[in-house]
Amino acid sequence: MLYNVLRVIRCFYQSQHACSVLTIAHSLRQSGIFSTMREVNIKGASGLCTLVSDGQSEIPQSVSDSENMGKSFFSVQSTPEIEKKYVHHVYDAIAPHFSSTRFAKWPKVATFLSSLPSGSLVLDAGCGNGKYLGLNPDCFFIGCDISAPLIKICADRGHEVLVADAINLPYRTDFGDAAISIAVLHHLSTEIRRKRAIEELVRVVKKGGLVLITVWAVEQEDRSLLAKWTPLSEKYVEEWIGPGSPLARSPSSLPLESIPENEDNGSRDHIEDSMEKMHETPHLTSESKYDSLSLKHEKNTKNQQEYFVPWHLPYHRAEVSGASACALANGLAKKDDKKGAVVYNRYYHVFSEGELERLASGIDNAVIVDQFYDKSNWCIILEKIL
């Protein structure tokens, strides 16, 4: 039955008929579809070969307001290739392993959600494995993410979720009481797309509604961490043509490859923010060597904000779906036999101080009510005023 419902939604979507997501959500809830969503066999990472070849997803897209239908229809097609290859496809492939490392809640996010009034409807854009969904038991949560395998993980846990694009959220205007976007915007490769994502978060909340946004900062607490990431070379700048494209930079002195790591991605012996650093931190035998590498890299990448951040997927996790074989064949991942892992590169635009506030301040119907730096992240809270 769910398959038929999704086919109907897709038909409406493709024919550009107006339809409110609230109506669809209500119908799904009434028919019990949301509660049985965990039974859906989403192709997810197993479809990576097809995704790599044509850049299209076979997952039916959600329907939003009529005024957003045209834009939503072209949302996937207009996504830059670098995001498709080094964000969407990567998270599809690593979803189960990534989810196993995402369980600790950031205190600042938990405080924000816990402060919301009872009965609030909270929209989590880029919900990942859903670790924040349901954090406040007195609120209602709906999550969305571009990765179908991550959404399936959320659905298996009983959350109300759907596959959707952060720059075309499938909700009507003034729908929710609050929204969050945790570690999402830094995966968008142009300024215009990052601003669009903020505008969408503001659009979907009611007047007086709050929006919390967090992004990775270039001003890392551990500055040497930047030396473990791979700065993007000019070859990728050609993919960012048009308004909001990053400025061309001098070719990096480092090759466009993952820098080796010795830490295990899935270790549960440390809190999450420590693990995030572990994913990207190699073992160095001496403090002097560590400092030398850091200073050399900082000099070469003084104004760098675009990086590839590696993810090591252990062989025993990589072959579950076979997606890694496709990624290796298409050059989107490489093997590290020494560590027994498939190495994926994830695209990041790390934000500089004031950059997030500048993007948000250009939105007419919202004001910044708080801004702070927390655990190497820039964070803002917006309030919708119109």
Image (cartoon, helix red, strand yellow):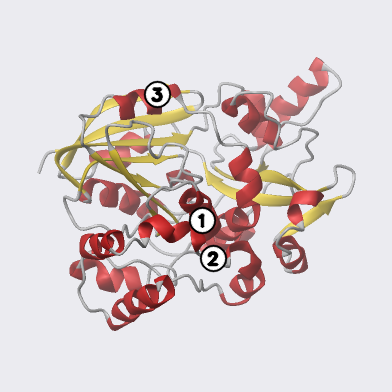
Quadrant into which the N terminus falls: bottom left
- Mark 1 is surrounded, within 10 Å at the Cα level, by few (under 14), some (14 to 19) or many (20 or more) other residues, namely many
The foreground one among 349 and 209 is 209
To which residue does mark 1 refer? 152
- Name the secondary structure under disc 2: loop
Real-space Cα distance between discs 1 and 2?
7 Å
Q: Secondary structure at mark 3?
A: helix
Sequence-earlier tag: 2 or 3? 2
**Residue 42, numbered circle:** 2
Q: Label 1: state its secondary structure.
A: helix
Residue at 77% x, 65% y is: 325
- Please give the label number shown on residue 108: 3
Of the residues shown, which amino acid type is indicated by label 2?
Ile
Left or right: where 294 falls relative to 133: right
Earlier in the chain: of badge 1 and badge 3, it is 3
Residue type (three-letter) at the residue carrying disc 3:
Lys
Residue at 48%, 49% (x, y): give it. Answer: 154
Of labels 2 and 3, the one closer to you: 2
Where does the image place residue 96, in percent across and percent down from the top left?
Answer: 63, 49
Residue at 24% across, 35% down? 382
Contact (CB < 8 A) between labels 1 and 2?
A: yes
Between the C-alphas of marks 2 and 3, the distance is: 33 Å
Figure check: 69 above or below 221: below
